[in-house]
């Protein structure tokens, strides 16, 4: 955002500022360390990077996150919930399933096919766990 403002309102010619901004972004900024939503909504349309660079960064981030173990992802550990099938690590779902932005769903994947997955979610004012 600061760079964008500088390009629009800074000293010298706008084209010169844009050239400097593109150079800074391509040489000094690691796109893969940015938030995916920010990359897709702001950086993509900034004019500082090629769209393919944004696509590559987003793909790299998604690949990295898909391969993280549950302990390294945003998660909640449930214990004392009554059964061992329900207790364990629930990992936050990032996919859009029709909930509001502030609502969250966490999933515990089953150890085997018989057990089944469980979901942890906020229902009104209480957290709830149910089979998925």
Image (spheres, rainbow, N blue to C red):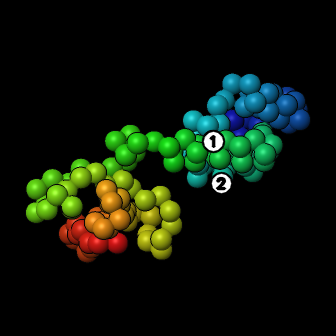
Rendered location of residue 15, percent (x, y): 89, 35
| Residue shown at 28% from the left, 66% from the top | 115
Give how far apart the Cα atoms at labels 1 and 2 are. Answer: 17 Å
Q: Residues within 10 Å of mark 2 (few under 14, many from 20)?
A: few
Q: From the viewer's perspective, is the residue at label 1 or at label 2 nearer?
A: 1
Q: Is residue 85 visible?
A: yes
Q: Dot 1 corresponds to which residue?
A: 60
Q: In the image, is 40 to the left or to the right of 16?
A: left
Please identify the quarter of the rendering in which residue 129 is found.
Answer: bottom left
| Residue shown at 24% from the left, 52% from the top | 88
Q: Secondary structure at mark 1?
A: helix
Which sits in the foreground, 14 or 122?
A: 122
Please identify the quarter of the rendering in which residue 53 is found.
Answer: top right
Where, quadrant-wise, is the C terminus in this rendering? bottom left
Answer above or below: position of 103 versus 62: below
Q: Dot 2 corresponds to which residue?
A: 41
Q: In the image, is 130 to the left or to the right of 63?
A: left
| Residue shown at 21% from the left, 61% from the top | 85
Instruction: Tell which residue pokes out farthest to the top in this image.
Output: 28
Q: In the image, is 73 to the left or to the right of 20?
A: left
Where, quadrant-wise, is the N terminus in this rendering? top right
Rendered location of residue 21, percent (x, y): 77, 32
Q: In the image, is 59 to the left or to the right of 106?
A: right
Answer above or below: position of 126 versus 47: below
Rendered location of residue 58, percent (x, y): 64, 46
Q: Secondary structure at mark 2?
A: helix
């Amino acid at each position: 955002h600061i760079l964008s403002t500088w390009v629009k309102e800074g000293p010298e010619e706008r084209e010169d500022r844009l050239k400097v901004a593109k150079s800074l972004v391509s040489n000094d900024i690691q796109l893969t360390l940015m938030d995916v939503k920010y990359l897709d909504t702001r950086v993509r349309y900034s004019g500082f990077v090629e769209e393919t660079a944004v696509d590559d960064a987003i793909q790299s981030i998604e690949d990295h996150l898909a391969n993280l173990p549950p302990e390294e992802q945003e998660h909640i550990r449930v214990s004392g919930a009554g059964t061992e099938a329900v207790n364990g690590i629930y990992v936050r779902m990032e996919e859009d399933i029709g909930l509001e932005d502030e609502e969250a769903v966490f999933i515990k994947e089953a150890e085997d096919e018989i057990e089944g997955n469980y979901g942890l979610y906020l229902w009104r004012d209480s957290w709830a766990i149910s089979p998925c």
